[in-house]
């Protein structure tokens, strides 16, 4: 049975009730009295909720009581919302006419009294009926003998589908599967079989079938053996077209928009014919042999000895698909499970590893049943628990006694220890299908729309609190971060099962032919996965979903073509007419060209996502969505403008029009959106912003990136102070920044300033800003002289924390081509030299304020750095210098006493290094592609009692001429005392190391470093735990010295692939530019 979490709903509802009691609505005699009684009863019930929610696991009747209580709370919330929406509607004129009358309204109009005695009586009667239901529940609680406990009334803000799998894997979390790996690889490289060979990895969920397949897939021996390697996440959708399309996309690296099977078969043949390939079909559920046989036939076009790996939980599937005996994956040993648990529970910043906690932890691990996922989740749970009593409570928890299958009790323990607000957020995620990559920002906005996210103070934005929630769910291993995408989360399929279990009938999903999960009368949140198989009965199911608060539409596959547009239109009409309580509606990619006027029925709506639809316009009736907070129209490429009624959306916070490539203008009514905080117009065809934008008093972020036609921006003297994020990249025709920004204007987050060759908007525009936070300046090759650079006045920006300065090399490459192909080579050559000299003057003129903490310099084409970089930045913590191909001399930065991270990469002309060893705070040092450095000697260490006193990570990579790394002087024997990670990659001439590096625990080596590998003394690296060997697959190259391998205590030697960071374009540019003076 599902858990019921009612406390967070009641907390939010009580806050709303108090607000309504104090406003005019609550002052009505009957209504105000009923509301006060409601609030009093709810407060009394809330005091015993913690006890009730804790005991419901064992007491079914109590769970039912909580369910009815939560239903009543939802009904109260809906009633309050409905009445507020009606009052707002009365205060406005018909959006079909004009917006002038509502412009004269005030906030008091929105909370005005009902317009008639009848309305008053009706509201009072409805509230009274709900209160009577609540009173019955209040009387029932006595029979449960519930105890009052303190309840947290607001969220804590401190420490706050299984994804579509890919071939990426973290090898350091791979335990106890070495023999399994060897057996699978042995089968894969065996060429004696001839025909297509198929092996199935079989085991229960959470055992690590996918992880084992990933490890095998990425093994260097496998990479060398197969010409093509393909990874496809199958899940429960064994559709031929989808699978073939996925294979084509993986092999070509491009999206496949072919629709006919014949065309896709032809393309598949082109990619795989006579090639030896490895195909991984991960997470297969199909038991239909005919489907498999048809698909298998398509794979016979490859070369002999091509192989397929199938991962599945089903022995039946393994028997019908595999050509050899299945490989049954067993549970991990307790020792291996303990290693995984220990890594999570006792990491940095976690519990202190005491003997008692280890003993209790091993007892907990025994209950994991050898399942890696359970050990991982429980280890994450224990990480935040410091006291022995807390560990004992988990060990002895009642959830272990439940009869649920598999590892659900172990996962449920982690869920039980979540605060109530996170329980609701987690359970909500069950509406997403398995294998869904969930965009974090979208998820947070959905949570906010449903009222799940609450802030303790007005100064903390709800979206920031939402990210805290995600971080906490990540820390508990209930969420994971996909390896191939930033800003997204995924849910393992077993964790998804847990979310479905705890959400029960409150969350549901309609899948394809409507045979997976139904919508129940109590369902509040649902998804609808649509495909070409839409059937009429779906209308009946949607029509009964009267109480839905979220409806999330999504395609079963990105390239699904919806054949029945009329049916999709009927579905939308049903949604708008039946689901009047919706708070969130997600319609991304929905096949629609226009919205019905009936969208005005959705008066409760807070979140509306219409991204990537074919909408050409929006109806005027959208102006009735007075509760709307987020409107996303991203990627609506046919949308040209918004209706005037958009100005009625008085509560809207975010308006996203990014990539609306036909969009040309905003209505003047946009200025009425007093709550608007984020306006995204990136990559639209807009030419100017209406003057009314100046009235957006709460605007925090505006994105104009790629608005190629914008020439000027309105002044904003009154409301510029709140703006924290301003993007103007690639606004080629922008002539000046808004005059209003001459006032004290603080960009506390990010300002992207792109200096375009044809733009009249120069660095002098920056001089009028008092910028705080991050400033990224690109296109510096277009600055003509020192004076123009000084006009930016960066030295006065005392609130600037991060500065990034970027030159594009294309301009200089054009000069070089002119030198080679024109008859006036001398003049062209001198022009190039002058341009490079100007770059040195420009960087000198961009001296920042001494408060700067992070500086990044990209593709600077000068030979020398300015003096201010040596001594004028006392607070600098991070310094990154990349791809400065002409730079010969590095600044002597030993006076940067707070510098902690230093990256020097792609500096091919630098021959020697400054005394970096004397940087007292330096923790991370990367030296990459310093092609001319031959020695690291005394100049590297500097003079002093020691060198690199706190350095923790040192990386020397692609230094082909480095022959000598001298030992520190006798007075500096205490060099590198804290170094824990050393990377020596592609330094083929390096003969020996300067030290035994007694503190190093992780070592990265390249197998081509033959001189170094053959000369390592036996006393080197006494504390080594992990060694990573790059490109070790070549049998002609030496392996790691045996004395190192013998001391490995954590994991065995790990292979990884390394490649040259310098590409051909880099080298060609270096060769040409090196001939210049």
Image (tube, grey):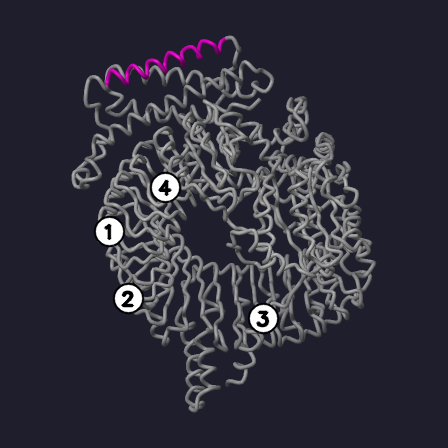
> Of label 2 and label 4, which has the lower sequence position?
4
Give the spatial CA distance, label 1 vs label 4.
21 Å
Q: Position of residue 896 (x, y in %)?
A: 52, 64
Q: Is residue 352 visible?
A: no
Element at label 3: loop
Discs 1, 2 touching: Cβ within 8 Å: no
What number is the disc on residue 694? 1
Q: What is the span of residues highlighted in magenta in the rendered image?
A: 120-142
Query: Foreground residue, 834 or 194?
Result: 194
Indicate the secondary structure of the residue bearing disc 1.
helix
- Nearest to the observer: residue 816 or residue 356: 816
Query: Reading the chain from its start, which is encountered first: label 3 or label 4?
Result: 4
Residue at image mark 3: 1063
Disc 2 + disc 4, Cβ < 8 Å? no
**Residue at horizontal 40 percent and vertical 11 percent from the top:** 135
Occupied quadrant, residue 326: top right
Question: In the drawing, what numbered circle is on residue 735?
Answer: 2
**In terms of image quadrants, where is residue 80?**
top left
From the image, tell me which residue sits under label 4. 630
Circle number at residue 149:
none
Task: Find the distance from the CA under tag 3 to the CA under tag 4.
Answer: 44 Å
> Which secondary structure dominates the residues rendered in magenta?
helix
- Locate residue 83, reporting x and y percent: 29, 25
* Residue 253, above or below 932: above
Q: Does the rendering let one see residue 740?
A: yes
Q: Are marks 1 and 4 in contact (CB under 8 Å)?
A: no
Above or below residue 436? Residue 251 is: below
Using the image as rendered, state which of residue 769 and residue 400 is in the foreground. Answer: 400
């Amino acid at each position: 049975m599902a858990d019921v979490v009612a406390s967070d709903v009641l907390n939010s509802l009580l806050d709303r009730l108090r607000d309504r009691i104090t406003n005019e609505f609550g002052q009505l005699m009957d209504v105000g009295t009923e509301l006060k009684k409601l609030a009093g009863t709810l407060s009394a019930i809330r005091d015993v909720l913690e006890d009730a929610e804790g005991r419901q696991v064992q007491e079914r009747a109590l769970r039912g009581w909580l369910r009815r209580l939560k239903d009543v709370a939802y009904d109260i919330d809906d009633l309050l919302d409905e009445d507020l929406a009606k009052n707002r509607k009365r205060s406005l004129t018909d959006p079909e006419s004009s917006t002038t009358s509502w412009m004269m309204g005030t906030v008091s109009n929105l909370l005005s009294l009902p317009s008639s005695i009848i309305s008053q009586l009706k509201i009072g009667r409805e509230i009274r009926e709900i209160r009577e239901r609540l009173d019955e529940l209040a009387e029932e609680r006595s029979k449960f003998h519930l105890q009052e406990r303190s309840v947290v009334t607001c969220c804590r803000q401190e420490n706050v589908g299984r994804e579509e799998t890919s071939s990426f894997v973290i090898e350091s979390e791979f335990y106890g599967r070495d023999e399994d790996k060897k057996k699978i690889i042995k089968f894969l490289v065996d060429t004696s079989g001839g025909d297509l060979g198929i092996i199935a990895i079989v085991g229960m969920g959470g055992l690590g079938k996918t992880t084992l397949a990933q490890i095998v897939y990425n093994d260097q021996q496998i990479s060398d053996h197969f010409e093509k390697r393909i990874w496809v996440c199958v899940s429960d959708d064994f559709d031929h077209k989808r699978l073939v399309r996925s294979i084509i996309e993986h092999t070509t690296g491009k999206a496949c928009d072919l629709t006919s099977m014949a065309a896709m078969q032809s393309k598949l043949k082109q990619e795989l014919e006579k090639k030896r390939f490895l195909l991984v079909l991960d997470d297969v559920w199909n038991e239909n042999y005919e489907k498999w046989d048809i698909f298998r036939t398509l794979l016979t076009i490859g070369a002999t000895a091509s192989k397929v790996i199938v991962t599945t939980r089903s022995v039946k599937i393994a028997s019908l698909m595999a050509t050899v005996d299945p490989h049954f994956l067993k549970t991990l040993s307790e020792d291996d499970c303990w290693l995984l648990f220990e890594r999570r529970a006792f990491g940095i910043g976690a519990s202190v590893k005491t003997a008692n906690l280890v003993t209790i932890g091993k007892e907990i691990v025994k209950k994991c049943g050898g399942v890696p996922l359970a050990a991982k989740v429980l280890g994450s749970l224990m990480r935040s628990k410091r006291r022995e009593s807390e560990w004992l409570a988990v060990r002895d928890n009642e959830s272990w006694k439940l009869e649920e299958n598999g590892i659900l009790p172990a996962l449920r323990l982690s869920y039980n220890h979540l605060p109530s607000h996170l329980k609701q957020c987690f359970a909500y995620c069950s509406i997403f299908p398995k294998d869904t990559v969930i965009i974090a920002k979208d998820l947070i906005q959905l949570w906010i729309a449903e009222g799940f996210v609450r802030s303790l103070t007005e100064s903390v934005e709800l979206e920031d609190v939402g990210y805290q929630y995600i971080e906490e769910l990540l820390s508990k291993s209930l969420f994971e971060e996909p390896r191939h995408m930033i800003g997204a989360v995924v849910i393992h399929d077993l964790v998804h099962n847990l979310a479905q279990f705890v959400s029960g009938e409150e969350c549901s999903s309609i899948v394809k032919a409507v045979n997976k999960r139904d919508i129940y009368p109590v369902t509040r949140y649902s998804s609808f996965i649509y495909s070409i198989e839409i059937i009429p009965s779906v209308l009946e199911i949607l029509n009964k979903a009267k109480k839905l608060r979220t409806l999330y539409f999504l395609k079963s596959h990105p390239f699904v073509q919806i054949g029945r547009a009329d049916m999709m239109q009927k579905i939308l009409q049903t949604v708008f007419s039946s689901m009047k309580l919706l708070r969130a509606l997600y319609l991304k990619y929905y096949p629609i060209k226009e919205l019905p006027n009936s969208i005005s029925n959705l008066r409760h709506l807070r979140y509306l996502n219409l991204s990537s639809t074919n909408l050409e316009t929006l109806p005027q009736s959208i102006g009735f969505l007075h509760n709307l907070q987020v409107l996303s129209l991203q990627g609506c490429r046919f949308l040209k403008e918004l209706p005037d009624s958009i100005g009625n959306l008085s509560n809207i916070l975010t308006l996203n029009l990014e990539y609306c490539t036909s969009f040309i203008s905003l209505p003047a009514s946009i200025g009425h959106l007093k709550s608007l905080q984020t306006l995204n117009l990136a990559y639209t065809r807009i030419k100017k912003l209406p003057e009314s934008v100046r009235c957006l008093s709460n605007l925090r972020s505006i994105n104009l990136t790629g608005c190629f036609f914008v020439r000027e921006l309105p002044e904003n003297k009154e409301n510029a102070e709140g703006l924290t994020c301003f993007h103007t990249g690639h606004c080629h025709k922008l002539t000046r920044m808004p005059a209003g920004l001459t006032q004290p204007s603080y960009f506390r987050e990010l300002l992207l300033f792109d200096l375009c060759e044809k733009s009249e908007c120069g660095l002098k525009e920056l001089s009028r800003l008092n910028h705080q936070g991050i400033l990224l300046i690109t296109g510096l090759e277009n600055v003509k002289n020192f004076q123009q650079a000084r006009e930016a006045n960066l030295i006065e920006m005392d609130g600037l924390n991060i500065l990034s300065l970027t030159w594009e090399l294309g301009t200089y490459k054009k000069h070089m081509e002119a030198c080679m192909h024109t008859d006036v080579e001398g003049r062209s050559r001198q022009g190039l030299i002058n341009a490079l000299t100007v770059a040195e003057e420009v960087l000198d003129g961009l001296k920042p304020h001494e408060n700067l903490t992070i500086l990044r310099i990209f593709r600077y084409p000068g030979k020398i750095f300015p003096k201010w970089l040596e001594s004028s930045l006392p607070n600098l913590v991070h310094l990154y210098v990349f791809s400065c191909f002409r730079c010969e001399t590095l600044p002597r930065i030993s006076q940067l006493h707070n510098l902690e991270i230093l990256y020097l990469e792609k500096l091919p002309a630098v021959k020697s290094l400054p005394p970096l060893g004397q940087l007292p705070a330096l923790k991370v040092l990367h030296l990459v592609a310093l092609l001319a450095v031959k020695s690291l000697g005394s100049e590297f260490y500097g003079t002093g009692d020691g060198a690199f006193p706190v350095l923790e990570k040192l990386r020397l990579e692609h230094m082909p001429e480095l022959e000598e790394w001298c030992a520190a002087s006798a007075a500096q024997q205490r060099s590198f005392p804290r170094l824990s990670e050393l990377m020596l990659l592609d330094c083929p001439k390096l003969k020996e190391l300067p030290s035994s590096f007694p503190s190093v625990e992780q070592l990265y080596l390249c197998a081509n470093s033959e001189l170094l590998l053959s000369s390592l003394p036996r006393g080197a690296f006494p504390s080594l735990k992990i060694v990573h060997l790059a490109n070790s697959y070549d049998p002609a190259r030496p392996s790691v010295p045996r004395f190192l391998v013998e001391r490995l205590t954590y994991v065995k030697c790990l292979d990884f692939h390394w490649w040259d960071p310098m590409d051909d374009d880099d080298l060609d540019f270096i060769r040409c530019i090196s001939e210049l003076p």
